[in-house]
Image (cartoon, rainbow, N blue to C red):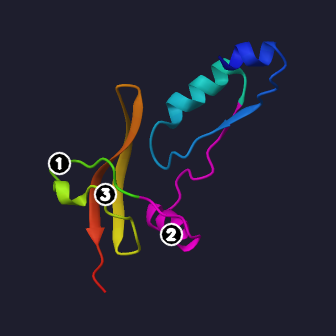
Amino acid sequence: MICNLNEHGGGIEGAVFGHIETHKDLVDRICGDLGIELLLPLWKQNSEQIITDFVDAGFEAIIVSAKADLFGKEWLGRQIDKKLRIVKSENILRDGLWFMDILSFARKDK
């Protein structure tokens, strides 16, 4: 699709991904094959700081998918705030939809 758009004057020069620790080889290969620049602004950054900055900037996020052996169903619909820290996660593709699979978390009680 990107090649097709560029052939018709789309002018796509790069792609931005929010990966922090995984899939760099995959997206690097894809962007290389397409001849576009890969941008990974969050690569190897502290995930706790990313969430803190996100919340401090006024954004809101709701848990819509969670690993059943870590979270009970009562976590679905819960807002991510400074008390919830995602320790490790990975992005997965299921039925054409991307999900953040939370592998471990910590709860800060203040």
Give the x, y percent position of residue 85.
36, 67
Image coordinates of residue 15 in percent, x first then y, are 66, 35
The mark lying in front, picked from 2 and 3, is 3
Q: What number is the disc on residue 68?
A: 1
CB atoms of marks 2 and 1 within 8 Å: no
Name the residue: 59% across, 31% down: 28
> Which mark, by number, is residue 55?
2
Q: Which residue lies furthest to the front in this view?
A: 77
Which quadrant of the structure image shows residue 101?
top left
Residue stretch rendered in magenta on the structure:
37-61
Q: Is residue 46 visible?
A: yes
Q: Residues within 10 Å of mark 3 (few under 14, many from 20)?
A: few
Q: In this view, does 83 lie to the left or right of 73?
A: right
Residue that numbered label 3 is attached to: 77
Amino acid found under the numbered disc labelled 3: Gly
Residue 110 picture location, percent across and down:
31, 87
Pointer 2 or 1: first along the chain:
2
Q: How far from the left and from the top, in percent, is residue 53? A: 55, 69
